[in-house]
Image (tube, helix red, strand yellow):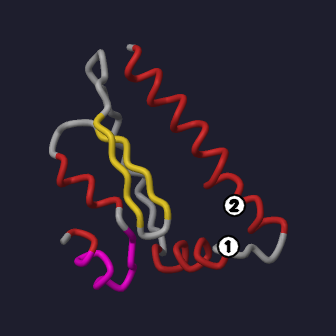
């Protein structure tokens, strides 16, 4: 339901708001096209957050349009770098971070 609401907005932000359905439990969410995989993280210590307001504006529609140009077939080195960064590099970072969170 959250995703359906998301795609009706002009910015078409995506699927991250679905995390709200899990409440206050930390959940690892993996996205692959239309597939969504979830796994509850069993963290050993309390999580502490820093929330910052940068007092800046952003153009979400422009950002997403730029990202969407990179997928599924990047056309130049910058787009290939974005695909690499948001794909395998990001996956390694997230996997390592989730292990560390669960180890405490």
Q: Position of residue 64 (x, y in %)?
A: 52, 74
SS of the residue at dot 1? Answer: loop
Sequence-first disc among 2 and 1: 1
Quadrant the N terminus occupies: bottom left
Residue 81 in the figure: left or right of residue 19: right
- Crowdedness of circle 2 by 10 Å Cα count: few (<14), some, many (20+)? some
63 inside magenta stretch: no
Q: Residue at x 32, y 31 (%)?
A: 41
**Percent position (x, y) of residue 94?**
51, 38
Prevalent SS, magenta region: loop
Picture residue at 36% right of the left edge, 85% below the top:
10
Q: Do labels 2 and 1 touch, CB within 8 Å?
A: yes
**Membership of 13 in magenta stretch:** yes
**Residue carrying label 2:** 82
- If the image is split into quadrants, where does the C terminus sit? top left
Vertical order, 58 against 38 (above or below): below
**Rendered location of residue 50, percent (x, y):** 35, 35
**Cα–Cα span, label 2 and label 1:** 7 Å
Position of residue 87 measured from the top left corner of the image (x, y, whole percent): 63, 54
Q: Secondary structure at mark 2?
A: helix
In this rendering, position of residue 23 left or right of residue 31: left
Image quarter of residue 75 = bottom right
Q: Which residues are magenta?
A: 4-14
What residue appears at the point 67 percent right and 73 percent down from the top-left corner? 70
Residue pointed to by mark 1? 70
């Amino acid at each position: 339901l959250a995703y359906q609401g998301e795609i009706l907005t002009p910015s078409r932000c995506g699927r991250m708001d679905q995390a709200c359905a899990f409440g206050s439990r930390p959940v690892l969410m993996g996205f692959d096209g239309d597939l969504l995989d979830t796994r509850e993280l069993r963290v050993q210590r309390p999580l502490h957050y820093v929330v910052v307001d940068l007092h800046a504006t952003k153009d979400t529609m422009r950002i997403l349009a730029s990202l969407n140009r990179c997928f599924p077939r990047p056309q130049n080195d910058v787009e290939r770098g974005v695909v690499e960064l948001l794909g395998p590099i990001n996956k390694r970072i997230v996997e390592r971070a989730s292990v560390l969170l669960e180890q405490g």
